[in-house]
Image (cartoon, rainbow, N blue to C red):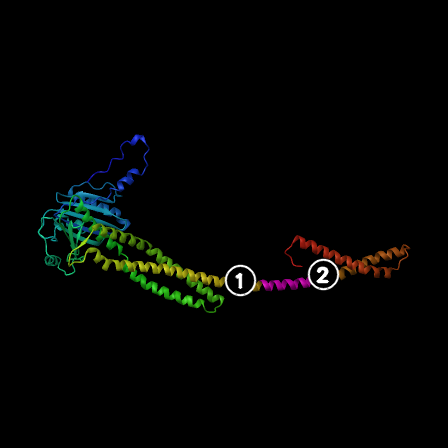
């Protein structure tokens, strides 16, 4: 394997180096395929792990390194590591977000492709103590071009099944056979026959086959939960239909309030489920895309009498992915329907409130008009009352003038003054009201 350039050397022309340049460059070379040369056997284990098990997984790999006297990864943050345990045995370990993979390569001739070999090459206690839960166990027997060709009958006998899948790969440079079923030891088995592979082609072919096995299992990891989700969605959809039907019926404000509370609860439940499954949906899509890419990279050609790998996966794997996608789309549609129903009910409640407010405003307007009429009546009475008292005051003045010798008839003068007094009071009140209206233009007259 070619080592990446030493980017810690003095920079070109003394230029400043971008801080992540070395990290980004090494990422392109982080997971190279192993240099596999047939005859060889490969055991691939995929262990589903939690993020909290990262240190435990790293320590477990370090234990194997100590057993074989190999330098362990120096950092607990290491996500991939390759080591040669002996002249014939090597390990490639990778830690992903959801799982860790352990791929063991055992080179050398073999008589039986799937006979036990790794149990004796590796510490039994270490194998039984790998952190996580086993999801995928795959054996690959890679036969060299010099090995005798096997007939279809011999292949069926080797795998012990009539459901054999096989195809030529890499434009006929190799042949791949499998039944994708778990054998007695719990592992699936793949037989690869070399025809004229060269260079790194054997390693890349092995890597693609292992990726297909790994990612197809990870893609449908949430499939059992999807079945439970489908039942839950059916219940929620029926509940939403009942609520929607009740919206079309005449109901009072209290009934609408209860319906709105039910819709809000249903919306919260929908969003909770959507958030719980969001990562599983997106991860499933990503893993499915990787499987499709690896299948395309195999460049299969059909072997007469056998279904190729892509056809088998299209018949078995694709329906499960479509079921997951259908559940996701169904959940999205349910969320949209709940939102529309809630909007409709809120609009109905708002219209009812608007009608109540309109009735309330009309009632208030009627009361204001009555108050205005009462006020005008009081103003009319106040004119006469003020006129009475003002005329009385003027009467005292006229009497005083008569005692002083002014020749006036007091009663007649008072009687003649009354219209002018009342008119003056009326004009004064009207003027004050006009000034008030100018100061407060929204006040009704």
Quadrant of image for the C terminus: bottom right
The residue that disc 1 covers is 354
* Numbered disc 2: secondary structure: helix
- Check the image and report above or below for 39 versus 154: above
- Residue 118 percent across, percent down from the top left: 14, 50
Magenta-highlighted residues: 361-376
* Extreme residue in the bottom direction: 250
Residue at point 55% right, 62% down? 357
Q: Is residue 269 visible?
A: no
Secondary structure under tag 1 reads: helix
Q: Nearer the viewer, residue 84 or 32?
A: 32
Residue 367 magenta: yes
Quadrant including the N terminus: top left
Report crowding for label 2: few under 14, some 14 to 19, many 20 or more residues within 10 A (C-alpha). Answer: some
Q: Position of residue 176 (x, y in %)?
A: 16, 53
Q: Quadrant of residue 156?
A: bottom left
- CB atoms at circles 1 and 2 under 8 Å apart? no
**Comparing labels 1 and 2, the label whose residue is closer to the camera:** 1
**Residue at image mark 2:** 379
- Whether residue 14 is visible: yes
Residue 188: percent from the left, percent from the top? 17, 55
């Amino acid at each position: 394997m070619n080592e990446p350039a030493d980017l810690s050397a003095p920079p070109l022309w003394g230029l400043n180096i971008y801080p992540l340049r070395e990290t980004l460059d090494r990422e392109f070379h982080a997971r190279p395929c192993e240099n596999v040369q047939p005859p060889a056997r490969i055991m691939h284990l995929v262990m589903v792990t939690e993020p909290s098990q990262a240190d435990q997984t790293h320590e477990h790999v370090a234990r194997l390194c100590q057993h074989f006297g190999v330098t362990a990864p120096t950092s607990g943050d290491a996500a991939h590591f390759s080591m040669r345990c002996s002249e014939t045995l090597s390990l490639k370990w990778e830690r992903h977000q959801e799982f860790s993979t352990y791929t063991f390569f055992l080179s050398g001739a073999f008589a039986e492709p799937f006979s036990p070999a790794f149990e004796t090459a590796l510490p039994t206690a270490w194998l039984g103590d790998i952190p996580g839960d086993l999801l995928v166990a795959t054996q690959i027997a890679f036969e060299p071009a010099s090995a005798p060709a096997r007939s279809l009958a011999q292949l069926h006998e080797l795998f012990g099944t009539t459901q054999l899948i096989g195809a030529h790969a890499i434009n006929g440079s190799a042949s791949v056979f499998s039944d994708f079923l778990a054998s007695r030891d719990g592992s699936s088995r793949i037989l690869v026959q070399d025809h004229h592979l060269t260079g790194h082609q054997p390693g890349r072919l092995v890597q693609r086959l292992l990726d297909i096995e790994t990612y197809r299992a990870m893609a449908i990891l949430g499939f059992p939960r999807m079945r439970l989700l489908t039942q839950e969605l059916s219940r929620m959809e029926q509940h939403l239909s009942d609520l929607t039907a009740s919206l079309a019926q005449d109901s009072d404000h209290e009934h609408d309030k209860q319906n709105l509370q039910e819709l809000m609860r249903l919306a919260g439940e929908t969003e909770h489920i959507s958030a719980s499954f969001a990562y599983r949906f997106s991860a499933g899509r990503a893993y499915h895309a990787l499987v499709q890419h690896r299948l395309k990279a195999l460049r299969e050609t059909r072997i007469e009498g056998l279904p190729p790998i892509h056809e088998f996966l299209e018949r078995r794997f694709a329906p499960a992915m479509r079921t997951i996608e259908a559940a996701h789309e169904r959940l999205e549609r349910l969320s949209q329907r709940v939102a529309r129903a809630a909007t409709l009910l809120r609009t109905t409640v708002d219209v009812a409130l608007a009608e109540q407010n309109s009735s309330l405003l009309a009632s208030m307007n009627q009361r204001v008009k009555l108050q205005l009429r009462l006020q005008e009546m009081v103003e009319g009475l106040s004119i006469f009352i003020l006129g009475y008292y003002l005329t009385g005051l003027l009467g005292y003045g006229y009497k005083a003038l008569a005692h002083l010798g002014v020749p006036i008839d007091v009663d007649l003068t008072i009687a003649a003054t009354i219209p002018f007094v009342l008119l003056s009071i009326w004009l004064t009140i009207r003027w004050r009201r006009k000034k008030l209206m100018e100061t407060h233009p929204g006040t009704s007259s």
